[in-house]
Image (cartoon, grey):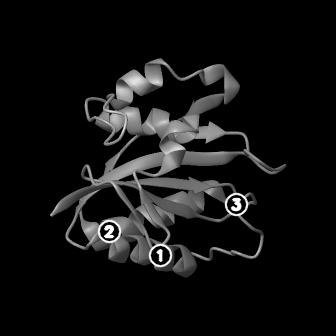
């Protein structure tokens, strides 16, 4: 069993799609530990604001199979991939961490580089795994957040 951390994002029917993704993940993995939901502006393109959060759960699938399952869940939840990497999306489920595994294989990179690049990934991750160390940098996620410039990517907590 491994502890998996997954980022969840949506900017199309945000509340409905995030709730549907969480329901689908609970059905598959059981109990989820969830960060707060954060609203953020679209990054890399003009589009509606996103809802973002990070969830943690115990998984018994190898990381490649887990990533493939998350991809299938996106498809089941209506994800349209025709718009490219920086585009609006109904749901985005990205495997961020799989215990402390460091991996770059068959298109799967762990820990996911976006952890160190985007406030909407790092802040919610620091909320639920603040004392955990980044497998590459060795710094805790709380420390990484403390040194992140939050003014570069504003975000607001969402009451849900």
Task: Using the rendered image of the protein, determine whether residue 160 is visible from the camera's viewpoint.
Answer: no
In terms of sequence position, does the residue under pointer 2 or pointer 3 come before the other? 3
Write down the quadrant of residue 78 in the picture. Answer: bottom right
Rendering coords of residue 54 (x, y %): 43, 47
- Determine the CA span between mark 3 and mark 1: 16 Å
Q: Nearer the viewer, residue 9 or 115?
A: 115
Around disc 1, counting alpha carbons within 10 Å, would you say few (fewer than 14), some (14 to 19), or many (20 or more)?
A: some
Residue 73 - label: 1
Given contact means CB atoms under 8 Å apart, are the residues at marks 1 and 2 in contact?
no
Mark 2, mark 3: which one is toward the viewer? Answer: 2
Q: Residue at x 61, y 30 (%)?
A: 156
Task: In this rendered view, identify the residue nearer to me: 135 or 35.
Answer: 135
Placement of 46 over or under 58, stated as above or below:
above
* Circle 3 or circle 1, nearest the eye: 1
Evaluate whether residue 155 shows in this view.
Answer: yes
The percent position of residue 41, horizontal first and vertical second, equals 72, 40
- Element carrying mark 1: helix
> Label 3's element?
loop
| Residue 94: percent from left, percent from top | 48, 60
Cα distance between the residues tagged 2 and 3: 28 Å
Which quadrant of the figure contains the N terminus? Answer: bottom left
Q: Residue at x 56, y 34 (%)?
A: 119
Q: Is residue 61 left or right of residue 83?
A: left
Q: Position of residue 42 (x, y in %)?
A: 73, 45
Q: Which mark is residue 12?
A: 3
Q: Separation of disc 1 and disc 2 at Cα?
A: 15 Å
Q: Are marks 2 and 3 in contact (CB under 8 Å)?
A: no
């Amino acid at each position: 069993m491994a502890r998996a951390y997954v980022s969840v994002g949506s900017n199309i029917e945000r509340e409905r799609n995030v709730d549907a993704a969480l329901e689908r993940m609970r059905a598959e993995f059981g109990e989820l530990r969830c960060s707060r939901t954060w609203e953020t502006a679209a990054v890399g393109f003009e589009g509606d604001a996103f809802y973002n959060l990070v969830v943690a759960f115990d998984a018994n699938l190898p990381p490649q199979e887990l990533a493939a399952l998350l991809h299938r869940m996106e498809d089941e939840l209506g994800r349209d991939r025709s718009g490219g990497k920086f585009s609006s999306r109904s749901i985005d489920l990205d495997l961020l961490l799989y215990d402390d595994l460091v991996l770059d294989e068959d298109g799967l990179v762990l820990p996911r580089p976006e952890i160190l690049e985007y406030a909407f990934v790092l802040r919610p991750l620091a909320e639920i795994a603040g004392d955990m160390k980044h497998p590459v940098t060795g710094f805790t996620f709380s420390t990484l957040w403390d040194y992140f410039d939050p003014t570069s990517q504003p975000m607001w907590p969402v009451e849900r």
